[in-house]
Image (cartoon, rainbow, N blue to C red):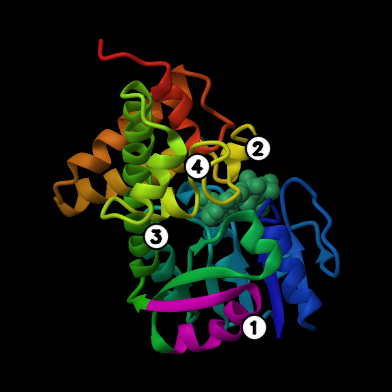
Amino acid sequence: MNIGFIGLGNMGAPMAANLAAAGHNVKGFDTAGVSVDGVETVDTAAAAVIDQDVVITMLPNGAILRAVAADIIPSMRPGACFVDCSTVDVDSARAVAEMAQDAGLLAVDAPVSGGIGGASAGTLTFMAGGSDAGFARAEPLFEIMGQKAVHCGESGAGQAAKICNNMILGVTMIATCEAFALADKLGLDRQKMFDVVSTSSGYSWTMNAYCPAPGVGPQSPADNGYKPGFAADLMLKDLRLSQQAAESADADTPMGALAQALYAQFVESENGAGMDFSAMLPRFEKRTRD
Ligand code: NAD
């Protein structure tokens, strides 16, 4: 296929490189002027999308996505497919899909899980929203960039799945970290805590696969000085998206709201920016009840 790829950052660059390595013709554009193995980089977004079968965007947020979409959609060939893989708010995903459909394009929102490691290894999970025809067009590319793609429903459903998943993740990580900090103060050995919880009803992905305590459980960012991994500021972004969605859908999400407040405090007032989101454990360790 002929593919345009806009946004060649930490995630987009390896995703585009994997598509090129699989034999697709990929033209890429990034405002930072990045170069990527196998990808022909061009000077404007429009130049990357003209005559392409599929255009993929991997951008920082919904406002940038909306601006890029308004810029490129008029240059895209009718019948082509616009696939946005960024994590953005549901409203932006739906607005961009509508803009694309009005111009005669297929549109899919397809945020990913799996991080930079998954993007490089081609093992991402895609959660997609859009028509059956749009999903069918994008699916072969998801198979190259990832190991699993779930068609979640109409436009916006992919973003809805992503932010619900990450709201659970943020809440669960905080619960796991505060429980470790409590266990410390009760004199419980961390390895014993892991041995019990990881095989009891408190088990979770954050405990079993991404344990926030250094030296306990499988290798995780905690074993690497809490270098991300998945940065606390990205977790804060996703929690904010979940609370924005909860407000617009009139859903009651008190735990999500509290997780957002705690990550905001951590990132904005406690030097948590740039640290892995599991660094909530040393944060709780230092704290007392006041
Ligand atoms: P990043 O900041 O490394 O990459 C974004 C890229 O977009 C940058 O290279 C930037 O120069 C480029 N860009 C910004 N404005 C642009 C424009 N107008 N036109 C063209 N390029 C533009 O971010 P990332 O880590 O690659 O994340 C991208 C998206 O993926 C985000 O929405 C993020 O939430 C999501 N995501 C990230 C991870 C992760 O672990 N990094 C995991 C899952 C999802």
According to the image, label 1 marks what residue? 53
- Residue 171, by quadrant, is top left
Magenta-drawn stretch, dominant element (helix, strand or loop): helix
Residue numbers of the magenta segment: 133-151
According to the image, label 3 marks what residue? 162
According to the image, label 4 marks what residue? 234
* Residue 129, above or below 265: below
Q: Mark 4 near ligand 1 (CB under 8 Å)? A: yes
Camera sees residue 245? yes
> Disc 1 or 3, which lies upstream in sequence?
1
- Tell me the kind of residue under disc 3: Lys
Whole-Å distance between the Cαs marked 1 and 3?
26 Å
Whole-Å distance between the Cαs marked 4 and 2?
18 Å
Residues marked 2 and 1 touching at CB (< 8 Å): no
**Which residue is found at the position 68% from the left and 51% from the top?**
10
198 relative to 15 in the view: left or right: left
Q: How packed is label 2: few (under 14 Cα within 10 Å), some, or many (20 or more)?
A: few
Residue 206: image x %, image y %? 42, 49
Q: Nearer the viewer, residue 238 or 219?
A: 219
Frontmost of labels 4 and 1 is: 4
**Which residue is found at the position 31% from the left and 56% from the top?**
164
